[in-house]
Image (tube, grey):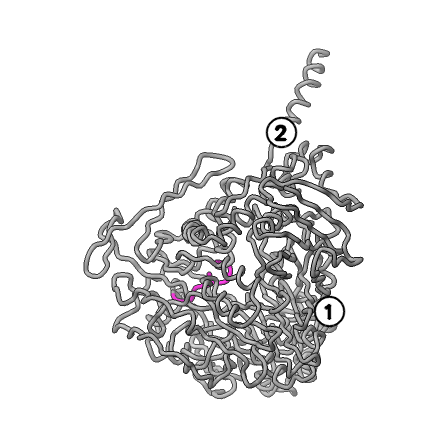
Amino acid sequence: MNKIKSTLCIIIPILLIFFCNKKIGDIPPVLKFLNPFMGFWKNAERSGLADEKISIPGAKDSISILFDDKMVPHIFATNDRDLYLAQGYVTAMHRLWQMDFQTRYAAGRISEVVGHSAIEIDRYQRRMGLVYGAENSLKGMMSDEKSREMVLAYTDGVNAYINSLSEGDYPIEFKLLDYKPELWTPIKCALLLKQMSAALAMGSNEFYMSNILQKFGNQVTDDLFPDYPFREDPMIPAGTKWDFSTLPVPAAPAFPAAKTKTNVKTHEKVEGIGSNNWAISGEKSLSGKPILANDPHLMLTLPSLWYQIQLHTTKGNTYGVSLPGAPGIVIGFNEKIAWGVTNVAADVLDFYQIRFKDKQRQMYWYNNAWAPVTKRVEQILTRDGKPVIDTVYYTHHGPIVYFKKPSYQLADNVPTGSALRWVVHDESNELLTFYHLNHATNYADYRKALTFYSAPAQNFIFASNENDIAITAAGKFPLKWKNQGKFLLDGSRPENDWHGRIPASQNPNVKNPERKFVSSANQSPTDQSYPYYINWEFEPYERGKRINQLLGKMNGATVDTMRKMQLDSYSILAENILPVLLKNLEKEKLSPAERKAYDYLRIWNKRYDAHEPAATIFDVMAERLFYEIWDDEFTVEGVPMRYPSRDRTVELLLNDPASSYFDNVKTKEKETLQDLISKSFRFSLDTLTKKMGTIGDKWAWAAYKRTNVAHMAKIPGFGSKDLDIGGAKGTINSLNGFHGPSWRMVVEMGETPKGYGIYPGGQSGNPGSRFYDNMIDTWAAGELNELLFLKDKKDQSKKIIKQLEISK
């Protein structure tokens, strides 16, 4: 017995060590994780911030990095090589795991970290051609001397930091997921930009639209899905004259669309991933100088999608936000200009149905002949098994993404048997755009910078010390016939191919318009006089309308005027349809609880304020009403379709209250608009009562919406609490549960520009740092931090809390 006990005393600790050093499911290897010398304890931030001196191989000269009280680095270098070397180093210092994770995701390499469970995620990324597109983009970057210098220097800086780490220094997520950072490579910079394009352009409506056309025919489709909205307030003021000679626009072929197969589901474009930007002339500001504002709406995550930084050399001085993993500043300002971006939502992604010669799929029919496919073999490595080999078939259009529908949700937007033509696959060099914007001094420099821009298509807003303001829809827009890509295309017909591109100089643009302001909110870029086709449907007009209303009557504006405007939660949708809803509710037939809800709506100021129950009632009711109007016609088993737009629905509510579409075709009775409104009202009250209790303050909009900032990998405990804030998708302060203003910025031009900005997070990616989420509460309160824009490294203030000196 004693021998058995002695043996067990030896074996059990050995087994514990073995199993506790293996990652099991979502549980990290316990002994490694708890190790006091290299486990999570090492990630607790020290209380002091000592100055440091280090050397980095490849530095040409000395570099100074000053950290302010928000841990924003201000880099001072004598040349561009050292500037981007230092940017790579310091960004990795704060965001290494984020950089690694985002580029692994873009490249389809998550299975290497978490195992076979991520195979479909990785397969999707590969099959959508993100790696293929990144390879082509890298060719563009490396073919230019300046962008090549940027990429290589940034890569060297990231690797210098990685090489300085011991295992105990790895960010905590590496320890939780039990893997090590790998060295940075130039293609990772390209992958990051491709993933941003995917996030902003991956919605697809053409399969829905093809099914609708096939089921209802041209008349109904044209009526319910018009080519231009009922109400619009375009980015470029209506009536703007186009001062250029247009290229010949190809005519639409007689039979452009492909017939659909009804066993495929797609995922519609989702409202909410949008943005606002605007700039006013000095004639509208108190200072007499332009003021520019921008708040891109994206997924809210910890760490933040953005990283604040100042880049200074003898050639330029720029402050703003960068994408962790790519050199340069994406949104920001320098001593002469400021700029910001919103998504254009251009149609730069089309699916072509392909006909193969036989089951071998070696040849496809195109232009009355059989053409050969090419094959790209993707090897997906996994943590817990053999590599998965996946072969992707490419036509001249692009990859045939799926032959059989997988279970992965993101793949729902991909029609099977179709090739993907996507501008993201083309060679490009967006880094040059940001390099030239970072160094721009006037309008001409701004316009030159945009000629290099390809994707994702963005509305670049501009303001300068010369009192110029402008906005341009920038990107590579295919030259198409009208509505090309509204429906699935027949891949065998050459007339369905793209026909070149719209010249960059002829993209929608306006400079110093008569109304003394420029703005965008993802609405239609132009009125119907613009000679080229960009898309048939954009984001609803309400945010753009509200912005233009406020700017139109604005005078003597200040930075604080703009800050408050970014927080505006007034609903143009409620302004349009709430009177119709109230008119059709019969007050005398309402129960006491229903009458209370009615009174909430009746006296509501139409603002989605945090503590407003009426906003909750209206939002649930309006969504249900749209369902009641359209679900009977546009939900058919086995035939994926979408509803008509909010704009078309509002037009019916206001102008055609007797429309036949208000009748439910699945019932014997003939329903009226009043019936649907009453039913939707009662549905909203029943739903909210079950979810939130008796009607009252507990129905507050913030409590229903539940906005929070989650960790990028959804690691429990690393996200924020629910935030008590207002705003909604259709308001300027466009906020839902997990999308919202990812960076709010206001810049007032002047001899020394004054910048203000904030994002919901912090500079550090380390949950053990006080700089991990230190700006969330300030962001939630609607405040902005003054941005410390230093003129030189001697121009230090009391806000500088640490200094890093880099020698060669």
Front residue of this view, candidates 550 and 713: 550
- The disc at residue 698 is 1
Q: Residue at x 77, y 43 (%)?
A: 46
What is the quadrant of the C terminus in the image?
top right
- In the rendering, at what x and y percent does residue 589 appear? 64, 85
Residue 110 higher or lower than 219, as above or below: above
> Circle 1: is it few (<14), some (14-19), or many (20+) Cα within 10 Å?
some
Q: Is residue 133 visible?
A: no
* Nearest to viewer (mark 2 / mark 1): 2
**Label 2 element class:** helix
405 sits to left or right of 545: left
> Circle 2: is it few (<14), some (14-19), or many (20+) Cα within 10 Å?
some
- Most extreme residue toward the left is 368
Q: Earlier in the sequence, mark 2 or mark 1?
A: 2
- In the rendering, at what x and y percent does residue 391 appear? 36, 45
What is the quadrant of the N terminus in the image?
top right
Q: How many marks?
A: 2
Q: Amino acid at mark 1?
A: Lys
Residue 260 higher or lower than 128, as above or below: below
Task: Please tell me whether residue 202 belongs to the stretch shown in magenta.
Answer: yes
- In the rendering, at what x and y percent does residue 497 appear? 30, 64
Task: Please tell me whether residue 656 belongs to the stretch shown in magenta.
Answer: no
339 sits to left or right of 135: right
Front residue of this view, candidates 100 and 108: 100
**Label 1 element class:** helix
- In the rendering, at what x and y percent does residue 54 appear? 68, 41
Q: Amino acid at mark 2?
A: Phe
Front residue of this view, candidates 149 and 532: 149
> Which residues lie in the magenta part?
198-206
Which residue, given by chain and number where applicable, does mark 2 sit on?
19
Q: Residue at x 62, y 57 (%)?
A: 314
